[in-house]
Amino acid sequence: MTQQRTIRNARGRAAWPLLTLLCGLFLAALPAAVAQVSSYGDKQTGDNYGNELPTVLKGASIDQHLNTVLPNVPFVDETGRAVTAGDYFGHGKPAVLALVYFQCPMLCSEELDGLTQALAMVHLDPSKDFNVLVISIDPKDTPVMAAQKKALYTKRYARPGTDAGWHFLTGPQASIDAVTRAVGFGYVRIPSSDGATTQFAHASAIQILTPEGKIAQYYLGVEYSPKDLLLGLVEASGNKIGSPVANILTYCYHYDPHRNKHSLLVARVVQFGGMITVAGLGGFMFLMCRRDLKLGREHALTRGDD
């Protein structure tokens, strides 16, 4: 009996250090997870506080103009050929539209990366089934820059025979204004402190357009669900107009004109999601510890009965 009690006590003492270690890891991970994402006002510029939107972003919004026709205004494609937006419609194929600028150091690349990765998992082919239109909002961008971006992203897309479905367009300010107004794409031009460069504060979104050039669906953010994209393209090909979506995680980066650099704006929903993840992990570890302790006690009692 004394030996059985000693074994049972030893198991109990062995389990407590494990529980202490796991709880310690959980408590250590919690502040780290919170620290990894800044609170909503920590990295804003100007005199904004709390939940107030930074002044620079108040003009950078996405207003969803569903069922609006993209205006047939002039642009230049990546080969230097004069085109119009209407050249890519009226042929029975929908299109994916992305409004970016080619010298963007952060957000635009993230958006195009997310689009390319999602389209790579969609079982439809550009040129054959739909078009991809990438239009620069910077009138200083050139066809050479457009060609470089097309080469980069068609290489990443890595599906031979589809390059003809990717179109990277540049154009004058009047054409850019017409398209951004129709799409509801707000942006703010921000010159650098030395005046040598210009950045743009803007939100991230792509749009699905019908074969007639009508806006059928908006997808916000920089990562897109392949399943949603496929469904959007299929529905748009039948001229079906979708429904508005919630403006969640629209603003990812903004330009700080005082520090001449970009800062990261992380929405509260990301912080909340991280805390849920850490709490879920801690709960899982706690339940596993309880289960192991219970099994240890039951095993010790069973041995004692023997």
Image: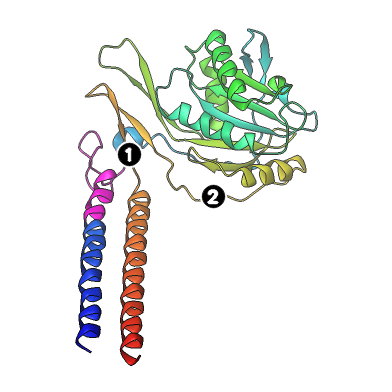
Q: Predominant secondary structure in magenta?
A: loop
Disc 1 residue type?
Answer: Leu
The CA span between labels 1 and 2 is: 21 Å
Q: How many marks?
A: 2
Measuring from the top left, give residue 288's x and y in whole percent. 36, 69
**Segment colored magenta:** 28-53
Using the image, tell me which numbered label, if any, was put on residue 265.
1
Q: Nearer the viewer, residue 251 or 153?
A: 153
- Comes first in the chain, label 1 or label 2: 2
Measuring from the top left, give residue 62's x and y in whole percent. 48, 39
Could you tell me which secondary element the residue under label 2 belongs to? Answer: loop
Considering only vertical position in the picture, is 67 above or below 125?
below
Q: Is residue 8 left or right of residue 239?
A: left
* Colouring rule applied to residues: rainbow
Q: Nearer the viewer, residue 212 or 8?
A: 8
Q: Quadrant of the C terminus?
A: bottom left
